[in-house]
Amino acid sequence: MATPLLALKGISKSYDQIHANRGIDLEVAPQSIHAILGENGAGKSTLMKLIYGVETPDAGEMIWQGKPISLPSPSDARQQGIGMVFQHFSLFETLTVVENVSLVVPGRRAVLIERIQALGRDFGLTVDPLAHVHMLSVGERQRVEIIRCLMTNPKLLILDEPTSVLPPQAVEKLFDTLRRLRDGGVSILFISHKLEEIRALCDRATILRAGQVTGNIDPRDHDAKDLARMMIGRDMPQPIAAQPMPVGEKRLELIGLDYQPDDPFAVALSKVTLEVRAGEILGIAGISGNGQGELAALISGESVLSEQKSDQIQMMGQPVGTFNAAERRKLGFAFVPEDRLGRGAVPELSLIKNGLLTAHGTGLLHYGLINNTQATAFAETCIRDFDVRTSGPTSEAGSLSGGNLQKFIVGREIMLAPKLLFVVQPTWGVDIGATIAIRQRLMTLRNQGVAILLISEEIEELFELSDFIQVLNGGTLSPRLETAHIQVEDIGRYMIGADNGAESLQP
């Protein structure tokens, strides 16, 4: 057999009392695509950080191309030919795309811009090289990370949830790219919670559970249910079905919403019309960067309208276009933002204090002072009821894995008992077990009469949860389509602007 490109022997890493990795053995063959599977908190991201030089192992040996190696920093890893695209991005938000790329990839500005544009065209990762990162959506930032990594010509490419924010049309194109890279001599470590992707793309899979290797398999020899069972050690629960609901009251209505952002890189919204009633889920589909961020900011209260346009956004029957986020929440509105580390939580604060961010009005304050007993109980309940894997409520939000932090944020908002819940990318980067749990919670709320607006780039998620779907493209919204009467291909046509065939699908 060929010498492994990378071999790990007995790699361990602990943080205080938490054993993130325990005696990990792993071999990545040359010219292979190797999956790392596991629940949130299983140790996948820690292991990748050890390989990329972000963290240093407490014990064990790393062998690169047949020789022992130490990687004290990501720079050393890149020099050896190891590149990584993180699930949580490592971009400077005040710099442009090309400026972020130039921090890692040498070259003249004009040449870098040309390479960025060429890679975007070739791999379906289009992004404006001159746009400032802080104005990009999560999906567009993901594209920048992938492009920047590919421009370093790596021998080993580590991808952490690379398809989680790509539209369906771009996923297979990315897979073709990864297969070409593999056939050209690049090995790939691929982390994804989408088990069918693993089966379609990967040659080998290593399964982690509680920081330990529990299996090394060929994923093509197992179906998705088998893989899920190996990951979590139990059978997956059956999804909760949508219950027939009478037509409820309007909880959210946008009436011909027009919005021209001040930022030249932002997407203008034109005549956006939708309604969400009690007991239904309206899903918004669309390729990232088509106005989802601008729409979310207007609905959540982060951005507000002028007094003249206030009635273009209505919640619980009253105009709220000029209301800020706190005023909207007082009406029974709750919000799970796309960016969990930044807008959803403060990384440096404990889970107790992160609970206070939106739940302070539920008895957690007394005459302006924090009721520590109640605030702690709130966080503990959220941790217990939503299966958040953490050492306790005093843990900093930034210490949680991405999926566990997402479960905490979703749980925090659900515990507010909202009349109207707005969720953006609720299962992005979340493992299969947590994904099912979050979706079941949303369906339970819907069956209890809560109105839910869902923005997601997961087509399967939209079809599983939504009663109706509308598609956002270029700042305009498609007609309201009943999910039971449409196919994925119909949504895909709207997503790419070919909107001539779905009109007839409405009942």
Image: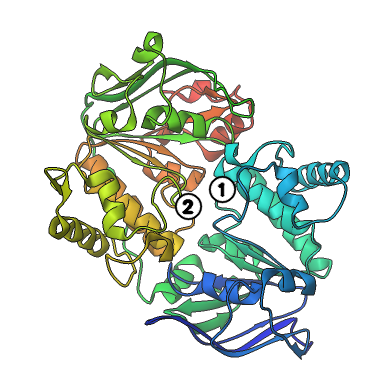
Left or right: where does residue 146 sit relative to residue 268? Answer: right
Query: Which quadrant of the view contains residue 424?
Result: top left
First in sequence, mark 1 or 2: give its number: 1
Rendered-image quadrant of the N terminus: bottom right
Residue with the mark numbered 1:
165
Which of these two is toward me, 399 or 498? 399
Which residue corresponds to mark 2? 428
Near mark 2 (Cα within 10 A), the count class, few <14, some 14-19 or many ≥20, is many
On the image, the x and y values in percent for residue 407 come to 35, 57
Q: Is residue 297 above or below residue 141?
A: above
Q: What's the distance in space between the residues labelled 1 and 2, CA to CA?
A: 8 Å
Tell me whether the residue at label 1 lies in contact with that at label 2, contact meaning CB atoms closer than 8 angstroms: yes
Disc 2 residue type (three-letter): Trp
Q: Position of residue 282 (x, y in %)?
A: 37, 33
Image quadrant of residue 250? top left
**Relative to 272, is 392 on the left or the right?**
left
Residue in the picture at 45% in, 48% down: 342
- Closer to us: 424 or 225: 424
Q: Amino acid at mark 1?
A: Val
- Is residue 442 or residue 59 the one in the foreground? 59
* Residue shown at the point (24%, 31%) measured from the top left: 278
Q: Secondary structure at mark 1?
A: loop
Coloration mode: rainbow
The quadrant of the rendering that contains the C terminus is: top left
